[in-house]
Image (spheres, rainbow, N blue to C red):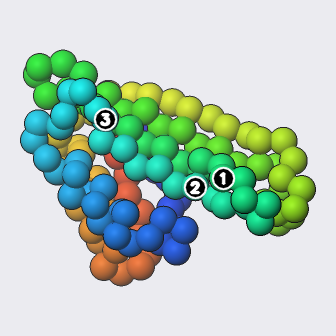
Amino acid sequence: NGFAGWIENTELGKRQLQDFARSIRGFPLPQAEPVCLRTQTVWTDGRTEERLRIEIRPYNRTGTLHVRIGLSGNRDQLHEQAPGPRHSVSTSFLTDYAMLDRFADAIDRILAQDSGEALLEEQK
């Protein structure tokens, strides 16, 4: 179990993804503000819609981390003029620094190859 999400480099920008990978390698992660990755779509009418949100913060003092994921999209992605009903899902799970480091490594590989996948696994 864990999280696997699809991120387009063109939408997100390689710089933002690189910054996120770098920030999740920090030890310890900040308590006050979660490390966060957000992607948005900007509609032709100027509205913005958050598509992906990943928030990671310490859960306890033993190295357990709390991960919150939010995904959203509209029913008909092909018709930007008529966004239609919004669909969204969110989940959370616990992980640890070792899993987070593997996730960051996978993000780096995606950036180097412009393809691939990054899986953030939950703590066992």
Residue nearest the viewer, comparing 46 with 109: 46
Q: In this view, does 107 lie above or below 102?
A: below
Residue drawn at the location 89% of the way across and 56% of the way down: 82
Q: How far, Cα to Cα, is label 3 from label 1?
A: 22 Å
Residue reaching furthest bottom? 113
What is the quadrant of residue 54 in the picture?
A: top left
Q: Residue under label 3, please give it.
A: 34
9 lies above or below 118: below
Three-letter amino acid code of the residue under disc 3: Pro
Q: Position of residue 114 (x, y in %)?
A: 41, 79
Q: How far across and how far down the image is residue 29, in percent?
A: 17, 37
Instruction: Say which quarter of the image contains residue 66.
Output: top left
Judge whether 18 appears above or below 37 on screen: below
Secondary structure under the numbered disc 3 in the rendered image: loop
Q: Can residue 123 be seen in this view?
A: no
Tell me where residue 6 appears, x and y as whole percent. 52, 59
